[in-house]
Image: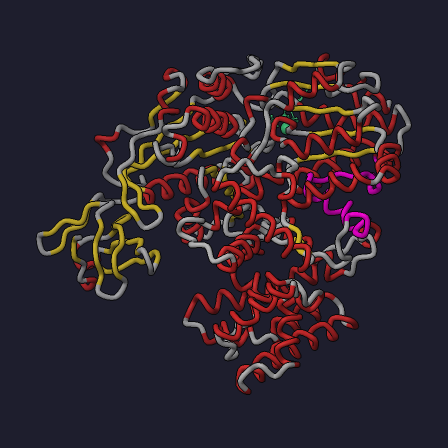
Amino acid sequence: MEVSSIIAPLNDQQRLAVSAPSQAMLVLAGAGSGKTRVLVHRIAWHIKINHISPYHILAVTFTNKAANEMRGRIEDLLNTSARSMWIGTFHGLAHRLLRQHAKQAKLPETFQVMDSDDQLRIVKRLIKNLNLDDSKWPPKQAQWFINAQKDEGVRARHMQDSGDFYLRQMRQIYLAYEELCDRSGLVDFAELLLRAHELLRDNADLLSFYRERFQQVHVDEFQDTNTIQYAWLRLLTEGNNNLFVVGDDDQSIYGWRGAKIENIYAFQKHYPQHGVIRLEQNYRSSGHILKAANTLIANNDNRMGKELWTDAGDGHALALYSAFNEQDEAYFVVEKIRQWVRDGGLRSETAILYRSNAQSRQFEERLMATATPYRVYGGLRFFERMEIKNALAYLRLSSNPHDDASFERVVNTPTRGIGAKTLDDMRILARQQQLSLWQAAQAMLEQNQLPARAANALRGFMNLVLELGRATQNSSLHETVKHVVEASGLIELYKKEKQDKGEARVENLEELVNAARLFDYDRENAENLSELDMFLAHAALEAGEMQGEADEDCVQLMTLHSAKGLEFKLVFLVGMEEGLFPSQQALDDPGRLQEERRLCYVGITRAMQQLYLTHAESRRLYGKDSYPRASRFLRELPQESIQEIRLRANVTRPSAAAPSASATLGGSTFKLGQTVRHEKFGEGVVLQTEGEGDQERVQINFRNAGLKWLMLAYAKLEKV
Ligand code: ATP
Ligand code: MG
C-alpha cells in the first residue's frame, strides 16, 4: 500500500525514475512534466522502500519556499516527520555547514551574512580607500567582478597577473575586499558557496563524514547551478554515484549570474554510470498555453530538444491586451483578477509576473485601491527596506561590533554629530593598522585624538552598542528587537520624518518586532547559534518571505525569475515590450536574447488554465516616458492560439465598468489616459469618470499623491 501511494500517481517514465536503483541519474524534461514531483517521490521511495533514514538524505532546491513545500509533500507521502533531512537552497545549506564548522572554515563563530547592498557599500569604500576614481572603477562593476570570480571558485590570490591593467586593478580591489571581510567576519552570498566548497575540499575528515552521511543527493533546477555549486555537489558524491538531478535546459535563466547550462553535459561525462530519463507529458497547462510555449522556444538554437504534449484539451486561447499606458495595464489586470474572484476563484491562484521589480508598483497601487490583498515576492523586500536594514545593523553590531558594514551604516543614523572628518580618519587608521572600524574608534578615543564633541558623540554611539549587546543577553528575541529599535533612536527618527513615509517606516519597525516574535527558532538545527544570530542569518538569506500574512488569500506578484518552478491557474505576463522584455541589454546580444526567450518560456509555462499577455503603448518607468514597441516574443507565438481582447483603435477607456469615456469641463475634454495637472497633487493620469454635469467626478492617478476621485467642477485640472 505504501509503495502504491508513492508510485500510483506517476506515469511510466516517472515511475522508472523514482524506482531506479541507486545511481547517478539525470531527468531531463520540459516545464510542467513532473520533474519536481519525481524528485519528491524519489526521496519518499528511498525512505520508505530502501529504508534510508531522512538523516542520510540531502536535497537542494532553488528557493526556501520550494524547500518548505518539498519537505511538506514528503512528510505527507510518508506520514512521518522528515526533520532530520537536509533540504534547502545552496546558500542556505552552505550557511549551515559554515556555522557548524566555522573554525575549520577559518571564520569567526560570530560571522555575519551580508546581502548585496552591504557588499556594495564595502566595495565603494574600498575603492575610495585605494584612491581610485569611482567613475572609472564603478563599484557595481567591481562587485560583479568579485562575485563572478567567486562563482568560478577563484580567489584573488589565484588570479594570474597577465599584465592586463584592468585585471590587475580589479585583483587589487578583490584582495582588499577579502581582507576586509575576513577582518570584519563578513560573508557575502558568493562567499558562502565558495567557502563551503573549500571547507569540504580542504578537510578530508569532514568530507568523508558528509560523504557517508549524504547517501542520496538530489537537486532540482539543475540547469541553473553555477561552477562552484556543481563542484560542491561533485565533492560530495564522487565515487558514490548517488547524485540525482532534474532539470530543463530550456529553463536556464541565470546565465547572467554565472549559471552553467554546460553542467548538464559535464554531469553526463563525470558520472559515466548514469541513467537519463526524459519526460514528455505536461500535466500543468492546457493545450493553447503549451503550444505557445513550444512554438516560442523553438526559436532558440542549441537546445537539447524536447517537445511537450498534453491530453488536457486546448482550453482557453491566450489573451492579448494592448494597454495605452502602464496604469491602464494595471487597471485591466486587476479587474480581471477581481472577476476571477467574483467567479469563485482564489486570489492565490493568480499571479502577475513581470521582468523587472520596478513594474510592481503600478499593480500594487491598483490592488490597494481596490482593497485586494496581494503579496510581492522579492523586489523591495521587507528585509531590504532602509529602516529595517538600519535596525538589523544595530542588532548585528550588538552581536559583533567588528562588523564594519553595519558600523558604517548606522554610526551616524540617527545623526549624532560624528563628522565626515572623524569617520575618514577612522577609516584610514583601520586600513593602515588592519583594524576593524570599531577597534579604530577605540584607539582614537584612547589616544585622545578627537575634538571633545566628536569624541563624546562617538563614545555615546559605542556605549549604545555595548548596552544593546548586554541587553540582548537576557531577553527574548522580540524583546531584544523592540529594545534595539527604540534605544537606537530609530523609532524617534522616523516619527519625525514627514507624513506617510515616516509612519510607514515606524510601522515596518513594529512589523520587525512582530517578525521576531513569530520567528521559528529551530533549536535542533541551530548549531549552537543564539536565536538572535539565527534571526539575522534568516534576514539575510530568506529575505522576502516575511511579507504579508502567509496564510491570507493573496494575489501573487513576482518577477519571472522568482516564478521558476511555480504554477498558477491564472497568469498575467505583463510589460511585453521591447526594451523591457526582452530587456534593453539583451537587444543586441544574441546570447542574452536567447536567455530572455527562455525566461518567457518559463513565464508562459507557469499558467495552468488561462494566460493573459499585456503590453502598454506608452510607459513611464524609472521616471522616463517611452513609447515601446510590442515585444518580439508576442510575434513568435502561434497567432491561432491568441485572442486579442480589444483592437487598439477602439481603446477609449480602461474599464468596462466605467460609464463614460471622457469628461468635459468648460469645453475642454479629458480623455482617459490623458495627463493632467492639479494645483496641489501635481501631475497624474485620468483613469475614469462618472456622473454628469455638476456631479461629474474623475478618477486620477497622481504620480506622487496616488489615486484620487475629484469633482470635476472644482478640481481645476489643466491638460499637460
Ligand atoms: P517546472 O519545470 O516548471 O519546474 P516540473 O517538471 O517540476 O515543472 P511539477 O511541478 O513536478 O513539474 O509538475 C507540474 C504539475 O503536474 C504539478 O501540478 C504536478 O502535481 C502535476 N503532475 C506531475 N506529474 C503528474 C502525474 N503523473 N499525474 C498527474 N499530475 C501530475
Ligand atoms: Mg519543478
Spot the residue most to the left. 667
Numbered range of the magenta stretch: 79-105
Q: Residue sitting at 38 percent across and 36 percent down?
A: 580
Q: Position of residue 179 (x, y in %)?
A: 64, 54
Residue 16: tell me if it is visible: no
Q: Position of residue 239 (x, y in %)?
A: 83, 23
Quadrant holding ligand 2?
top right
Query: For this rendering, which residue is in front, 424 or 348?
Result: 424
Query: For this rendering, which residue is in front, 720 or 372?
Result: 720
**Res 577 → quadrant:** top left
Query: For this rendering, which residue is in front, 322 or 159?
Result: 159
Residue 41 falls left or right of residue 228:
right
Number of marks = 0
Spot the residue most to the front. 163
Q: Residue sitting at 54 percent across and 31 percent down?
A: 255
**Res 162 → quadrant:** top right
**Res 518 → quadrant:** bottom right
Residue 343: tell me if it is visible: yes
Q: For the N terminus, which image quadrant?
A: top right
Residue 307 falls left or right of residue 317:
right
Question: In the picture shown, does residue 40 fall above or below 265?
Answer: below
Spot the residue most to the right. 51
Q: Position of residue 29 (x, y in %)?
A: 62, 18
Q: Position of residue 415 (x, y in %)?
A: 50, 76
Q: Residue sitting at 75 percent across and 53 percent down?
A: 107
Query: For this rendering, which residue is in front, 86 or 122?
Result: 122
Q: Residue sitting at 67 percent across and 20 percent down?
A: 266
Question: In the picture shown, does residue 275 fall above or below 195?
Answer: above
